[in-house]
Image (cartoon, rainbow, N blue to C red):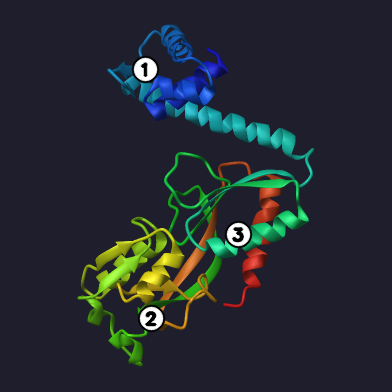
């Protein structure tokens, strides 16, 4: 049993296609197929159900995949531990950022100016099977192995066009919005989820007229009167135009946390950035 066989196996378990795995490893598909076949012969059982254009893990394959994945994490942690003490503040930090991209990017910029040998791999909340050193999110990341530290707490406002009747109101209730068209971020994102939560708490399901992954255009669409939307007061600070009216929602605040997995080894570089990120957020004027 060879390490390369296991790498091919784990990748094929995800891609469900030997040709896609071959492309990622820059080898012919036959190399992947033959390598996995040798692995199956060594184990004395098949690990995949082979179909016309895809392969799917069978029951034995699922068990073997979980075991190999756990072993891979143990080996990676061991590698980090034995090499970490010899390093300066350098290397790679992998972040998954579900919210507060502006603040996090500013913190990264300040950190890399001080430690230019550090590089970052950033994922802005898109689904992935990758493991990350730190996760920035406003929802519970789940699992007993995850440790969280609060970074930011900010008020939530309703944004409407200056031509909207609510713009002239000093007070309003959320249940007044049940017939409104909402503009929000893409499905599964922080403010899409919050929009549903706030409306559900008021007893109705929001009518989502536009979903958009670009905050600039969300603000523009609201300015144009195409709908209304819930927005973060601090994260988008300084980005609201004079054509928008902002009505703070009393009693609602968004808390952003940073998470790390206590079962994974945290390198000195990642710990240093985590300390920097917490201090950087403390200094923000919210």
Q: Provide residue 183's location: percent of width, then percent of height.
A: 33, 68
Report helix, strand or loop for mark 1. loop
Which badge, 1 or 3, is on the more N-terminal residue?
1
Based on the displayed image, in which of its 4 quarters is residue 92 positioned? top right
Assess whether mark 2 and mark 1 are in contact (beta carbons under 8 angstroms): no
Is 50 on the left-hand or right-hand side of 153? left
Q: Residue at x 34, y 18 (%)?
A: 48
Q: Residues within 10 Å of mark 1 (few under 14, many from 20)?
A: many
Asked if one can make out residue 132 in the rendered structure from this viewpoint, the answer is yes
Image quadrant where residue 102 sits: bottom right
Question: Which residue is drawn at the image coordinates 42% and 82% (left, top)?
Answer: 243
Q: Position of residue 8 (x, y in %)?
A: 48, 20
Q: Secondary structure at mark 2?
A: strand
Residue tagged by mark 3? 105
Q: Does residue 38 lie above or below 117 as drawn?
A: above
**Pointer 2 residue:** 249
Q: Residue 251, relative to residue 102: is it above or below?
A: below
**Residue 86 pos. (x, y %):** 79, 38
Residue 277 at least partly seen: no
Q: Secondary structure at mark 3?
A: helix
Residue with the mark numbered 1 = 47
Q: Earlier in the sequence, mark 2 or mark 3?
A: 3
């Amino acid at each position: 049993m060879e390490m390369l066989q296991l790498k091919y196996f784990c990748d094929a378990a995800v891609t469900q296609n030997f040709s896609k795995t071959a492309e990622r490893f820059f080898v012919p598909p036959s190399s992947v197929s033959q390598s996995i076949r040798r692995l199956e012969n060594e184990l004395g059982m098949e690990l995949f159900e082979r179909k016309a254009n895809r392969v799917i893990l069978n029951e034995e394959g699922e068990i073997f995949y979980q075991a190999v994945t756990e072993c891979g994490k143990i080996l990676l942690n061991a590698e980090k531990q034995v090499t970490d003490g010899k390093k300066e503040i350098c290397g790679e930090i992998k972040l998954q950022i579900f919210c507060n991209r502006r603040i996090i990017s500013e913190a990264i910029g300040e950190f890399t100016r001080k430690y230019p040998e550090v590089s970052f791999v950033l994922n802005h909340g898109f689904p992935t099977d990758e493991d990350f050193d730190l996760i920035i999110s406003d929802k519970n990341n789940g699992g007993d192995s995850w440790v969280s530290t609060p970074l930011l707490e900010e008020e939530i406002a309703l944004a409407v066009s200056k031509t909207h009747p609510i713009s002239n109101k000093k007070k309003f209730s959320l249940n007044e919005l049940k017939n409104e068209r909402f503009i929000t971020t893409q499905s599964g994102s922080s403010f899409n989820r919050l929009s549903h939560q706030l409306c559900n708490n008021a007893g109705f399901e929001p009518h989502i007229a536009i979903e958009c992954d670009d905050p600039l255009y969300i603000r523009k669409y609201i300015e144009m009167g195409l709908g209304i939307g819930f927005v973060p007061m601090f994260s988008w600070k300084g980005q609201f135009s004079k054509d928008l009216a902002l009505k703070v929602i009393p009693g609602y605040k968004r808390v952003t946390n940073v998470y790390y997995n206590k079962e994974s080894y945290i390198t000195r570089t990642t710990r240093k950035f985590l300390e920097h990120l917490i201090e950087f957020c403390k200094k923000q004027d919210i």
